[in-house]
Image (tube, rainbow, N blue to C red):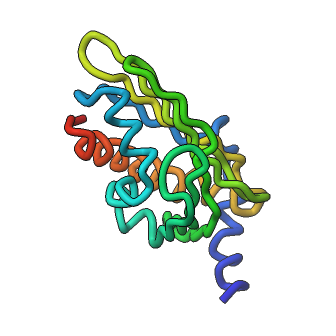
Amino acid sequence: MRPMLLSLLLPAALAADPPSSADIVSERVVSASPEALAAVLLDLPRYATALPPACVGRLTIGTPQSGLGARARIRYDMAAMHRNLDMTVSRAEVSATRAIVDFDHASDRGFITRWFLESQADGTHVKVTTAINPPPWPFTKYYFDAVKPEWDTCQGQIVENVAKLAGGGA
């Protein structure tokens, strides 16, 4: 199967240069407060209900289950990418008007997803950034053409689901 996969990917990998950023960025204004949104993010059993099954195949919650240092094992499924990673809440700064929550997916192929939540006149501005190093050749083009668009969609769905769980809408 591996030679067949390479024969399919190789021509695409030799095509045009990829976009400059591999990062996944989602931004929305939602009606929930930064504190309510952060409460969902910091409670991993609750957060798990916001994860679309098509994007996250499995989330096994560890100990502790909530707050700074909460841990889980997560399997991401996007296009043909399937990645199992340990995840830790590595940053949790929460106030009435602003919150920052980081999910650290530590490994040699890991990444950090940062939720930046800030009150503004029409709701809470939510910016979720997943900082990614694109995969090496010959998989780079496939990442930009198939994985990244699906990941963008999934991350947007997660933002909407977290907002609903926090009592607001996107």
Residue drawn where x is 42% and y is 45% of the image = 41
User: Where 27 falls versus 53 (above or below)?
Assistant: above
138 relative position to 79: left or right = right
Q: Quadrant of the N terminus?
A: bottom right
Which residue of the protein is positioned furthest toward the top in this rendering? 121
- Which of 15/57 is in front? 57
- Report if residue 144 is visible in the image: yes
Q: Quadrant of the C terminus?
A: top left
98 relative position to 2: left or right = left
Quarter of the figure with residue 92: top right
Residue 109 picture location, percent across and down = 73, 58
21 relative position to 27: left or right = right
20 relative position to 46: left or right = right
Which residue of the protein is positioned furthest toward the bottom in this rendering? 1
Residue drawn where x is 68% and y is 66% of the image = 11
Residue 129 picture location, percent across and down = 54, 36
- Which of 118/20 is in front? 118
- Report if residue 22 is visible in the image: no
Residue 163 picture location, percent across and down = 28, 39
